[in-house]
Structures are given as C-alpha cells and as structure tokens.
Amino acid sequence: MAPGPRAFWASVGLPLFVAIFVTIALVLTGVELPFALAWAVLLSTIVIARRASSPASEPGWPPAHKQVVVVRGSEVSRLAWSFAGRNGVAGPTIVRRVRNLLRRRLAHRGIDVDDPAQFAQADAILGDGVRAGLFHHQIMRADIERALDAIERLPRTTQSAEPSLPAHPNADASTTPDHPAKEDR
C-alpha cells in the first residue's frame, strides 16, 4: 500500500526546503552553483538520515486501525450448537472440551486416560463404558451426558501445588481465611 500525498510531503518537504534554502544562500554569498548544489545535497542527506533515525519517524497518533474480529454468541451457545440436531452426534468442539476436562480431572488422581494400562482404573472411577464412550469414532449426546455426570460425581481432590498452611492452634472447624478465629479478630 503506497503512502498518501500527505505522507510523501511530510517525508520529502523538509529536506527539499533545506536543499533549496542552502543552494540560494550559498549562491548569494558567492559560491559557485555546482558547489552550492553539492552542499545542498549533503545537508539534505543529513536531514533525511536524522529524520529516519529519530522517534518522530515512528507512526504517530492515532495508531493504525487494527482489524477487530467480532465473535457473536457465547461459549455456551457455541457448545450447544456443536450437537447435530437430527442424529444427536456431538461436534468436535464439545467432544474436545469434555475429553480435556476428563483428562484434567483424572490427572489429579494420577490416572492417564490415554494409557491402555490405566483403562481399568479409569473405568473403575468413572463407571463402565464412560471412558470408552467418549473415545470412539462417533460420540453421541448420551455419551457426553454420561461423561459429564461421571465427572460431576468425582469427589474434588485436595491435592494442590501449594503447600498447605498449618492450622491455627485455637482454630475450630469453621475458621477460614475469610472468617478468622475469634482470638485473631
């Protein structure tokens, strides 16, 4: 995309003005025309080099218009539309999301869903057919529902990457960081 006329004159105007001014000034002071033109070209080159290396040569305000991608609908609506209505086949978006959720939840328990040696452990936790129903070619809506139900039935793990804080000696079971013990208030 070629710059417009305003950009052209902004980049050429000052060096051109310097060249004309220097040439006229030197000719009026008695310097011969070829030498005056040489000095004008030299000074114009210096001006161009200075302008090219200065921060003022950066694009100014307003910044270039960025193309904004408008996404209509919410994540929930896109997941809902990923089911085929007539035959109940689950789309790739929702299948990927549920598989990743299942992988993450079972990974907290040390089980790799993709490892055939651990299929029996995964089936014991999830229930018979849940893992197999989610990892075959054509996944139906019922398979997704069974997998989500099994994931919701999983007890939450208390394993965390952060070390747990020691309990306050005077704290009772209802003490939390948001609700400290009465002695701490």
Image (spheres, grey):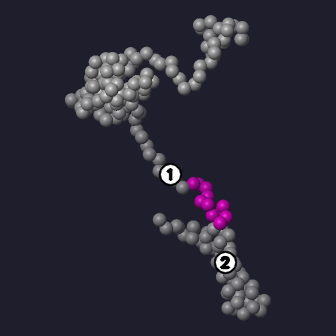
- Earlier sequence position, callout 2 versus callout 1: 2
Secondary structure found at label 2: helix
State the residue at coordinates (67%, 9%): 169
Relative side of 126 to 55, left or right = left
Residue highlighted by disc 1:
66
Relative side of 51 to 6, left or right = right
Secondary structure found at label 1: loop
Range shown magenta: 53-63
What is the crowding at mark 2: few (fewer than 14 residues within 10 Å), some, or many (at least 20)? many
Relative height, residue 64 to residue 4 (above, below): above
Q: Is residue 113 visible?
A: yes
The answer to which image quadrant residue 7 occupies is bottom right
Q: Name the spot of residue 180 as percent of width and height, x first.
A: 66, 12
Residue highlighted by disc 2:
44
Q: Amino acid at mark 2?
A: Ser
Q: Amino acid at mark 1?
A: Lys
